[in-house]
Image (cartoon, grey):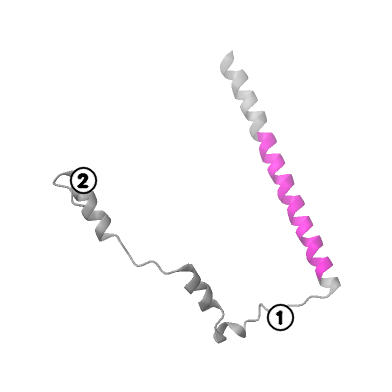
Amino acid sequence: MSFGFGPAAEMHKKVNSLKRERTSTLKKIKGLGTKANDCSSLKNKEASPEQLEKIRKKLQRENKRNFILKVIFFAISLILSIYFMGFYKS
């Protein structure tokens, strides 16, 4: 299907020049199970209950801190927006 002239022809040329061979997702997944990846250190990770508890508490502290920072930021921005709305009305 060929377009005669003008912008449509240029678009058609551009589309044809940008075509590429797309690899199948299934081929990518099959390539993940090769012998080189079998010795990965990520597969056999184990942690003691004490380590898991320490990790859980650390994550809770980080999440609490992030939540507090977000609340403070939202409160300050809300207060400033109310202040400036009142300032511009008068």
* Magenta highlight: main SS: helix
Q: The residue tagged with tag 2: helix, strand or loop? A: helix
- Where is residue 75? Give x, y as percent: 69, 35
73 lies above or below 54:
above
Q: Is residue 59 magenta?
A: yes
Q: CA distance from mark 1 to mark 2?
A: 57 Å
- Say which residue label 2 marks: 8
Nearer mark to the viewer, of 1 and 2: 2
Q: Nearer the viewer, residue 54 or 90?
A: 54
Quarter of the C terminus within the rendering: top right
Identify which residue is drawn at 52% across, 76% down.
30
Is residue 55 rendered to the left or right of residue 73?
A: right
Q: Residue furthest front?
A: 1
- Where is residue 77? Give x, y as percent: 64, 34
Residues packed near mark 1 inside 10 Å, few (<14), some (14 to 19) or many (20 plus): few
Give the amino acid type for the residue marked by disc 1 in the picture.
Asn
Give the amino acid type for the residue marked by disc 2 in the picture.
Ala
Identify which residue is drawn at 72% across, 78% down.
45
